Amino acid sequence: MHWNGGPLSRASRVYVAGHRGLVGSALWRRLRAAGFTDLVGRDSTELDLRDARATAEFFAATRPHVVIDAAARVGGIAANAARPAEFLSDNLRIQVNLLDAAVTTGVERFLFLGSSCIYPKSAAVPIREDALFTGPLEATNEGYAVAKLAGITQVAAIRRQHGLPYISALPTNVYGPGDNFHPRTSHVVPGLIRRFHEAARDDAPYVECWGTGKPLREFIHADDLADACLFLLEHYDGEGPVNIGTGQETTVAELATTIADIAGYRGEIRWDTSQPDGTYRKLLDVSRLTGLGWGPPAISLVDGLKATCHWFLDNQANYRG
């Protein structure tokens, strides 16, 4: 089942690596809605993608036509800073094993997902794809970023050496149902959602947030990201990665105020300026993606945050974290 450009056959066997995560589960929903009938997924208890032999055996047994790599060790500033060696080692092994197995078994189409946080910390905003590899990385995120940069490099090398139509994409900050709400390892949106809902429940007099609240961030709902990924698989075949974002940004303080309002929290928001802000701005230039014909995203930030808050409340018994 060879891909010659254009729409993928809905009978293609598609393996979504990391299909139970925030991005992977959104991809699964989008592919199902689009009519794909042969989706393959394994959770980490069934297949450890850090194990090269197990990964190779899985590919040999299942023979997927299309692979989307949404599997990664991810976390916020605190998690990255505390375990940089794990973020580097685990992500390198996951993506190398997936890409090596894909080449060996003749996977026709592969989408590797990186992240906007792998750009140099001083990159001009909005950040263009050609800013990659042009300067020092954000120190709190270096291990993860180096691993993902290696993945983009491997995809480009596979294209040059094997002529396979493998591609890379760089999403901005993703949020939505199925996120990680752990108080120490979450990203900013789920972390704030949990904190403000618990503060509202407990009638806390104040909520303390990290940093100054001044940094600007761009957010995309996981379902919009999944839609963009399918769009790229059917419309893009180039060596360079493609940014996936909304082209809009908000301050972390504005984000906190919005989430507090949705959660019904009426207390004080305090900012712990002894804690790091991370990169000040990370707005992506999405002209390459929109130039291909995708967009605008369907879900506004406020609507997406409301839906994610509702999901959090409805799933407190079984959410991650």
Image: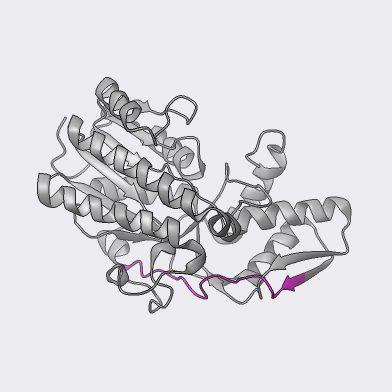
**Residue at image point 31% right, 28% down:** 53
Q: Let me know if residue 210 appears in the view.
A: yes
Residue 150 location (% of width, % of height): 30, 55
Name the one closer to the observer, 303 or 217: 217
Q: How is the image coloured?
A: one colour
Q: Magenta residues?
A: 270-287
Task: Determine whether, in the image, residue 216 is placed left or right of residue 36.
Answer: right
Is residue 282 part of the magenta span, yes or no?
A: yes
**Residue at image point 41% right, 29% down:** 41
**Residue at image point 69% right, 54% down:** 193
Is residue 39 part of the magenta span, yes or no?
A: no
Residue 34 location (% of width, % of height): 36, 36
The quarter holding residue 260 reads bottom right
| Residue with the most extreme top position | 61
Q: Name the image quarter holding the C terminus.
A: top right
Name the one closer to the observer, 264 or 91: 91
Name the one closer to the observer, 254 or 118: 118
Q: Let me know if residue 245 appears in the view.
A: no
Residue 267 location (% of width, % of height): 84, 65
Q: Name the image quarter holding the N terminus.
A: top left
The quarter holding residue 245 reads bottom left
